[in-house]
Amino acid sequence: MIATTQYRLGAAELEVLLAMVRTGTLAAAGERLGVDASTVFRAIQRIERGLGQSLFERSRAGYRASELAQALAEQAERVEAALEAARTATQAQPEQITGTVRISTTDTLLHGLIAPALQRLQPRHPALVYELHAGNELVSLTRRDTDIAVRATKRPPQHLVGRQIGTIRSALYTAHTSTLALSDVQAGRAAWVAPDDSMPDHPSVRWRKKQYPKVQPTYRVNSLLTVMELVARGAGVGVLPTFLAQGRSDLRPLTGSLAECDNELWLLTHPESRHLRRIAAVYGHLADTVELP
């Protein structure tokens, strides 16, 4: 490609680039921008012609940002923050916070901790909208497709900023109606419900393999919420976070807190976006209100 000598990037072009870097697809970027996918495609083509080089690697999986696109996205986030600050300064009611906040976490943390906290925040900022992504994959921690990430990890990514907001503790549970005792588990007379290969490094998996190396789980699932529901139904025993299980009358702990299963709970965001009012409001609320037993 040959760059147009008079070509100059503007705020509108940076907004398109940022949407593409964050979402990775034309359709998702268009939805974020309020236009159709073909409009985004043509805008990206104009920018690439103007710059004289490609910004994205196309594949069936979507658009992968080049180093230049990532660098431009960082500048676009600064522009976004400056524009939001300018809009805030002109608001008749500066205390009113509006916009969308994208939060990435796991289904366990979402249902057990994050959703209840957001429900308490909603009356204070009724104009805020939340996009909630629940999944065990860490892709959203390394791509710009989320504003706040809430993760159980002892090694948070270095390119993000955040704080540890607690320690996740776990115990071995069975159904309240079950006659199983810990001695039955130790003797190999209990069925197990456990995470599958989608969570190979989960602390509960490592603990089980160390303490009960001969155990082959009867049920292997891709969600701790599913582990909890099956255990509560009497399907077997399973390791569960105490914050999730303690309010359930249909569960009974067989052990105390398992120290080897302890994990850290981190609240994370990007350095470039942490000062945006909408993100700062939600981040601060979660940091102040999310509590672990």
Image: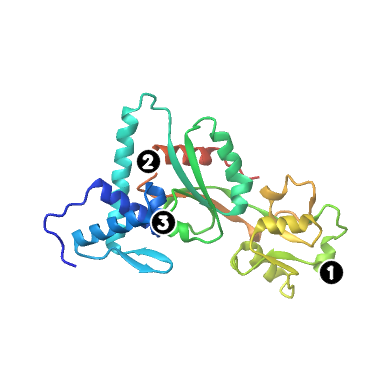
**Mark 2 or 1 closer to N-term?**
1
Could you tell me residue 44's position as x and y percent?
A: 29, 58
Question: Viewed as shown, does residue 142 lie left or right of 291?
Answer: left
What residue is shown at x 50% (from left), y 60% (from top)?
A: 138
Q: Please state which of residues 86 and 25 is positioned toward the viewer in this rendering.
A: 25
Identify the mark at residue 275; answer none if there is no mark: 2
* Colouring of the image: rainbow
Q: Which part of the image, by quadrant, shows the C terminus? A: top right
Q: Residues within 10 Å of mark 3 (few under 14, many from 20)?
A: some
Of all residues, the one furthest to the left in this rendering is 5
Alpha carbon separation for disc pair 1 and 3: 52 Å
Label 3 is placed on what type of residue?
Answer: Ala
**Mark 2 or 3 closer to N-term?**
3
Quadrant position of residue 24: bottom left
Q: Which part of the image, by quadrant, shows the N terminus? A: bottom left
Residue of label 1: 189
Of all residues, the one furthest to the top in this rendering is 92
